[in-house]
Amino acid sequence: MKKLLSLGCITLALTGCTFTGANEVAPGEYMISSHGSIFNSREGLLENINQKAAKVCNGKPYRLEGDTGANMLVSTTSHLGPTPTTVLGLKAICESNQQ
């Protein structure tokens, strides 16, 4: 019974987790996506993307390109079957100081 209760608590704690990753697609340009459970808001995923953009651009100014209002709900296959997941992806373009 204790194991089942512990597993339930861990599962509830992980339901709000997100993962945000960045891939360089060109010099100074990064495709950044944030994935989370259906309980994550668009604003939360956008904040995660902004934090990752600031990190990959080393604190330099950047701009985001893409549709921030895009449909975010997708179905991800897991060991439990199809699982609803939220995903938001945008391109971050780091501004250079060269003129």
Image (spheres, grey):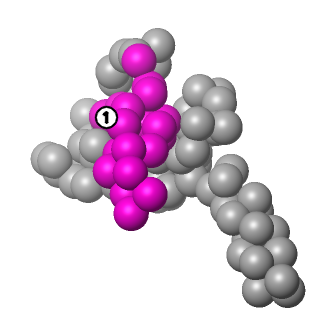
Q: Circle 1 sits in a helix, a strand or a loop, which is it?
A: strand
The residue positioned 45% from the left and 44% from the top of the image is 83
Residue 91 in view: yes
Find out whether residue 15 is within the magenta segment.
no
Label 1 packing within 10 angstroms: few (<14), some (14-19), many (20+): many
The image shows residue 35, relative to residue 80, as above or below, that is: above
Q: Which region of the structure is painted magenta?
A: 71-92
The image shows residue 76, relative to residue 68, as above or below, that is: below
The residue positioned 38% from the left and 44% from the top of the image is 82
Would residue 60 be found to the left or right of residue 15 on screen?
Answer: left
**Where is residue 99 drawn, in percent x and y?**
26, 34
Name the residue type under label 1. Lys
**Where is residue 42 drawn, in percent x and y?**
59, 27
- Point out the residue furthest to the front here: 1
| Near-viewer residue (98 or 84) | 84
**Displayed quadrant of residue 78:** bottom left
Find out whether residue 72 is within the magenta segment.
yes
Tally the numbered discs: 1
Q: Mark 1 — residue?
A: 91
The residue positioned 34% from the left and 23% from the top of the image is 65
| Near-viewer residue (4 or 41) | 4
What secondary structure is the magenta-colored segment mainly? strand
**Where is residue 70 drawn, in percent x and y?**
40, 16
The quarter of the rendered structure image containing the N terminus is bottom right
**Where is residue 94 drawn, in percent x and y?**
35, 41
**Displayed quadrant of residue 66:** top left
